[in-house]
Amino acid sequence: MSRLNFGCGKNIKKGYINADITPFDRVDEVFDFNVFPYPFSDSEFDEILADNILEHLDDIPAVMKELHRISKPDGAVRIIMPYYNCYGAYNDVTHKHYFSHLSFEPFYKKDTRGNYFIKEEFELKRLKLVPTRLGKVLLFDFVRIPLSFVFGQIIQAIDITLIVKK
């Protein structure tokens, strides 16, 4: 199984190709994630982990197109990112994008005519909202989500897994 740790930083994972823009110790591939195409073959990876990297990049649809290209059919793309109104999202001046639980719908949800919003197709496997300590008190997402539109610090992160359809 081939796996890519996309935007690994210093979080080197065994059994993965660890890729980052900075040549930290034990990073396998160093390249600029805002420059396309990426230095990987079509359909190379069974699994891609993008842990707290997409919010730093310029063009999210272009990145998703590239992740789709380098993923095998039925490969998994797991994306973890800070929730838009949590401290982790807006306390970092290098963040260029902010995400809610609805942000990735254009990649897996069809429009009213049955067409995908984005040409590259994904299927939603899992969408988990990671609550803050305060959010855990509220117990359920059907309570957390509406409150998160009014109050910050209820949901801290989004953990979404998309399956590549080719």
Image: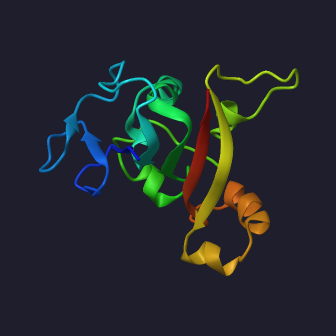
Question: Does 157 appear above or below 72?
Answer: below
Q: Nearer the viewer, residue 153 or 126?
A: 126
Q: Nearer the viewer, residue 6 or 69?
A: 69
Image coordinates of residue 111 in percent, x first then y, are 81, 26
Q: Is residue 85 visible?
A: no
* Position of residue 126 in the picture relative to residue 15 (left or right): right
How many numbered discs sit on the rendered protein? 0
Q: Nearer the viewer, residue 103 or 29?
A: 29
Q: Residue at x 44, y 57 (%)?
A: 88
Q: Residue furthest right?
A: 112
Q: Residue furthest front?
A: 1
* Position of residue 32 in the picture relative to residue 69 (left or right): left
Q: Residue furthest bottom?
A: 137
Image coordinates of residue 52 in percent, x first then y, are 41, 49
* Position of residue 34 in the picture relative to residue 136 (left or right): left
Q: Residue at x 55, y 71 (%)?
A: 132
* Position of residue 149 in the picture relative to residue 48 (left or right): right
Q: Residue at x 61, y 24 (%)?
A: 120
Q: How is the image coloured?
A: rainbow
Q: Residue at x 79, y 64 (%)?
A: 142
Question: Does 68 appear above or below 7?
Answer: above
Q: Quadrant of residue 151?
A: bottom right
Q: Say which quadrant the C terminus sits in.
A: top right
Image coordinates of residue 41 in percent, x first then y, are 36, 24
Question: Does 112 appear above or below 101?
Answer: above
Q: Is residue 71 visible?
A: yes
